[in-house]
Image (cartoon, grey):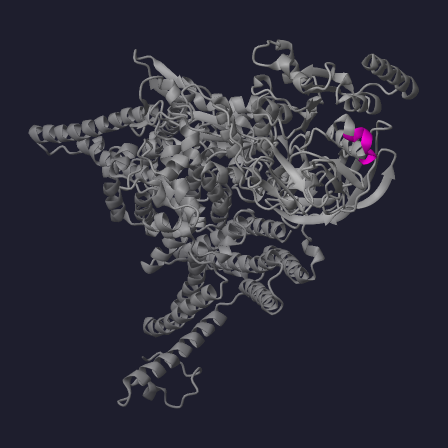
Amino acid sequence: MFINGLRVLAFATSLLSVAAVSVTPRNDTLILFDPKLLADDAFTASQFSELYAKLTNELHYNVHTKSYADLSAKSDDAKFELDFANHRYANLVLLPTSLKKLPKLSAGKLLDFVNDASPELAQQANVFVVSSPKHVNDDFRAFLNELGIYPAPKNHRVVDHFNYVDVEASKHDLLRLPLVSGENLVANQHIVRDLDSILYEGSAALISNSPLLIPVVKASRTAYTANSKDAADVWALGSQANLVVAFQGAENNNRVVWLGSDALVGNEFLVAETSNSQLVTDLLRWCFQETGVIKLADASLTQTHPARDLKISDEVTYAITLALWNPATAAWEPFHTTDLQLEVIMLDPYYRVFLQEAEETASGVVYSRTFKLPDHHGIFKFLVDYKQAGLAFVRDEIVRPIRHLANDEFPRSWELTNAWVYISGAVTVVVAWFVFVVLMLYSDDGEKKVLVEESKKDI
Amino acid sequence: MKPLTSVLQTTAFALKVVIILSIAGAAISSRLFSVIRFESIIHEFDPWFNYRATKYLVENNFNDFLNWFDDRTWYPLGRVTGGTLYPGLMVTSGAIWHVLRKLSMPIDIRNICVLLAPAFSALTAYATYLFTSELKDSGAGLLAAALIAIAPGYISRSVAGSYDNEAIAITLLMTTFYLWIKACKLGSIFWSALSALCYFYMVAAWGGYVFITNLIPLHIFVLILMGRYSAKLYVAYTTWYALGTLASMQIPFVGFLPIRSNDHMAALGVFGLIQLVAFGNYVKSSTSSKQFKTFLTVSLVLIIALGVSGLFALTAAGLIAPWTGRFYSLWDTGYAKLHIPIIASVSEHQPTAWPAFFFDTQFLIWLFPAGIYLLFQDLANEHVFVIIYSVLCSYFAGVMIRLMLVLTPVICVCGAIAISKLFDVYLNLRELAATSEETRKDRIFQLLSRMIVIMSFGFYLCFFVYHCTWVSSTAYSSPSVVLASRNPDGSQAIIDDYREAYYWLRMNSPEDAKIMAWWDYGYQIGGMADRTTLVDNNTWNNTHIATVGKAMSSPEDKAYEILVNHDVDYVLVIFGGLLGYSGDDINKFLWMVRISEGIWPEDISERSFFTARGEYKVDDQASQTMQNSLMYKLSYYRYHEVFGMQAATDRVRNQVIPKKDIELDSLEEVFTSENWIVRVYQVKKGDNAGRNLQEAGSFERKAKGGRNRSAKKPEVGLREL
Amino acid sequence: MAKVKKSVNADPDPVIKITPVKTSAAAAVTTTSVVSFTQTLQKTLEAYKSSLTPKFALIDIFLGFLVALGALQFVFCCLVGNFPFNAFLGGFISTVGQFVLTVSLRLQFDDENRVAIWKGQGKEMKWRAMGDYIFASLVLHFIVYHFIN
């Protein structure tokens, strides 16, 4: 009955929220859960009910749920495979599972899901993966390994003898992490706001040096991640252990967030601590492409003196608009930054300059710069490649040929003082020649006499 | 001498016109084999660039053409094409196109380009007729015209479809020489000025103009040494030099070379020399011979000292450019192979083999020395010119097979003179009729000997025609874009893989796609597929070519870096193993290695591509470097699928390719032509998950296999942030 | 060697110079040849002066003017530097080319030459030569102006 009551409550609140805010449900989200790990039969009443409520009521996603059991090797759910391959679901939440084999969600399939969604077709593929120390599925682990996240094996837990919450029979693995920006909360306003402390109980992961990974929450320096059964089997030490890791795809900006603890998304922590709730909300919003989404638009290269094509040392103005998506108003907003760079490249960069804010419109900020083109002809790329941790990776490229000077674009001879001597020489030659020819043709001195004598000789 | 009646004169003139027209007809028709057999298509490689340039010229105006910056070649460097080509050929075709349009006969520019060479070969025949008539008489002239019209040495570079600079260059060569001889004979400023203008046209048309630049001064120099200086020579040479040099500097590609480079210094030297000789001649006419001798000795000593020291000083100061590499390679045939691999790798630059002389000129090759000997007997100024031309050109034709083309006209001229003199003697029926004292027996012997000689030479001439036609038909009429072979049942099989692949590229790739292929195919890709290429046959930038060579010979991951750096979208490879087509990239591979080794000796080493025993192998004995190189992988990717269970044989190298699958991670195959000659691969974008493509590829392959159950601690470095 | 001109030589005893000196054969030869050289030149100058007609004088004045102009341009180039090179070449070659063409014209105008070298040509050859000369000069000037840009 209590469950039914909750259901009615959830329904009512969703109706209310719809009526009040009238925001249309957003991208299709699929939550996959393992029924064996639920505290209740129904998902919406289990220990993940707060998560469910958060997704539907607070964030207004169109949420579907599915059980892993339906996807096991024996069942035959062709519709799911099709839906999955066609990216019907933009967002995926993978809760921990005890199943060993999930052929429909193998590492290759998950990787393809993230890699193949193309932004041109307006497809998104964001995955929110939750691991639990007791259940580390091999497929998910292989998938995460390919991204560069190496979660600890089964039964490894994060233990901290200095920051634990003292409960009875505590193995010091229920931690209250003080989130100190720069120490174990990566200072990144785009993903998670500043919080004071969160509760954590779970596992950790090592991550590679890939620039696409952003560790959001790291363990404290005093923690270590070890096998709860064999303390000598240490996976990671100190803050090399990452508790929450974010990943953003290089080509299509699809995001994957990994949490090392299923308790983080469980009702207990979400209800007990506001900062936990805030953390999960922020992570979900970032993961499902609400926050931190920027775009470049209207890149243009205009000449100060318009001509048919670009030539060397021309003065040009490069302008580009940068905008940030605001999920509340569902519109693009101006985005201010001071480190937007333009590169002018032909095999090697010829210029690398900062763009300055020129004007601010309702839907973006225009950055521009006026400069002279390089003195070398060739086919140049005007590249803006803006990659900041937490923001979408945006890149805009204009490729233009820059030609050499035409034969009449050099300084002309009459403009060069040196050449005046030679020009006057040449002109003098022509004038003198003309005079000479006239004189030759029309002066008849001595010639006639000689001719007359000769003709006399001939006779 | 009986005066010719006007009827005879008219008949002779009419006969000459008819003969010249039929020679022109023969010249044009013997070059049309490939048009009749295949179609009207541009052949080979270089003509495709000329064709593209001509299309640009007729679509835009001349000014745009002169300042053309081509952004579809040599990506991303581009090429200042307007300033680095010889515009004569394109301007000629463009002018003809415009004129025909004005006459309301709009002929497609492609047909004009294809048929330009035969048309100009008819003009060459006429120019040779004029030239030889100046040397001997119009009979020899007609013979020379007939010989040059069908000589295979000239046909090889002027068939219909061979739209290359030589098509008009030889015409202009003979015309310039004709005008020069006329100028020397008449001592007229007008003819010399015309000769200079024709020389300017020649400079605009072909880089081989340097030959004329050195031949004419050499002619004057030899005449001066022979003591034959006269005012006519002064008039002819100085006018030619002044106007010709000034005019030749108007071509952007030539620029200031006539003043600066050593190739042209001979002309300048002779110019100065002739001024001095003229002055000396003037002095000689005013003084006694003994005084003049001392004067001559003193002045000679002074001048030689000044001249040599001046030349050395200027070269040392860098004002005069030293000899270029191509020039060195003419004198020392081993030079290019060591120092400039690109020049050595061109097949046209190889030394000429003995049979090539006979193949290209048949019986004229033994008439050639006879003709020169007969010229020695006359030895007027113009004969000295032909002798010098023959000697000089014989040397160069022996060094580089491409220069066989320049030797062919003079062989025809000398051969014609020899035959003409022979016929003068043996066909002299007047002489035969005039001798009345002989007995009947002697007369029969005379008649018999004449008949024998005339019939045998008549036979030689007829056989020459058969030989030339056969050679043109079989050897020099293949478009080389389309290959022809025979099916087992004897019918002709056309192998059109090149055009199939280029057309596929044209239709299925984005317009701004960049193609990387070896430089041989650059012009064809630009012309037929209309796509941007990285390197092409112009080979002006050795480092860029070496970059392509490095990409082809490096392992896949290093090659991928180069491909991404140069924005390459497609890689094109020629593979002849299935057909037995031996002009493929694996055979050229060692040149790629050598050229890139010249720039990056620490990355590429030619030795590592051979087996331990020093053999060049592609089967399972091939060295690791060879098997990992991009070229090997792209050529043999999926090759054994054609053979199924049988051994995959490479029919060119006659070796068996190992059966294991070649793994290609950074590129994917998008097109293979029907006979596997052209293979096109697309460069994959970077991995979305940030892995390098090798790891991504191996993950794909493992994912198909088992699964990894154990969780090993990965070897990752400390992450700082 | 009886052709010593009295008017030329200031030497009191020219005969002695011609006989070989016993001391140094080489020095004698050198001095002999140098004197002979200058003698030859002076002789040529006299022959030249005697054969000068007004037309030839006109031609020679024009030639001298061209040489002076060319030398002036060359000196200027050496002093100031050869930028712009094409203008220098244009100006210089216009003088050199015109000089050469005019000398060719002079050679054709010389009656001795006409008979000896251009055999069998009539007097209209002069007019033809003039016509050729004008044609070539026009071509020269056209190219020069194109070159100077």
Depth order, front residue of A57/B236? A57
Locate residue A136, reporting x and y percent: 60, 27
- Compared across the picture, whether B676 is left or right of B459 comes to right
Locate residue B338, reporting x and y percent: 35, 50
- Compared across the picture, whether C111 is left or right of B218 comes to right
The question of residue A452 being in magenta is answered with no
Instruction: From this view, report whether residue A378 is shown above or below residue B233.
Output: above
Locate residue A384, reporting x and y percent: 70, 40
Instruction: From this view, report whether residue A78 is shown above or below residue B151.
Output: above
Dominant secondary-structure state across the stretch colored magenta: helix
Furthest residue toward right: A20
Depth order, front residue of A133/A331? A133
Residue at horizontal 22 percent and vertical 31 percent from the top:
B427
Depth order, front residue of B185/B366? B366
Position of the N terminus of chain C by quadrant: bottom left
Q: Residue B302 is drawn in which quadrant?
A: bottom left
Q: Residue C82 is drawn in which quadrant?
A: bottom right
Q: Residue C73 is drawn in which quadrant?
A: bottom right
Q: How many marks?
A: 0
> Is any atom of residue B525 visible in this view?
no
The question of residue A271 being in magenta is answered with yes
> Is any atom of residue A141 visible in this view?
yes
- Compared across the picture, whether A175 is left or right of B73 comes to right
Locate residue A112, reporting x and y percent: 60, 24
Depth order, front residue of B235/A282? A282
Residue at horizontal 40 percent and vertical 42 percent from the top:
B593
The residue range painted magenta reads A269-275
Instruction: From this view, report whether residue C73 is shown above or below residue B663.
Output: below
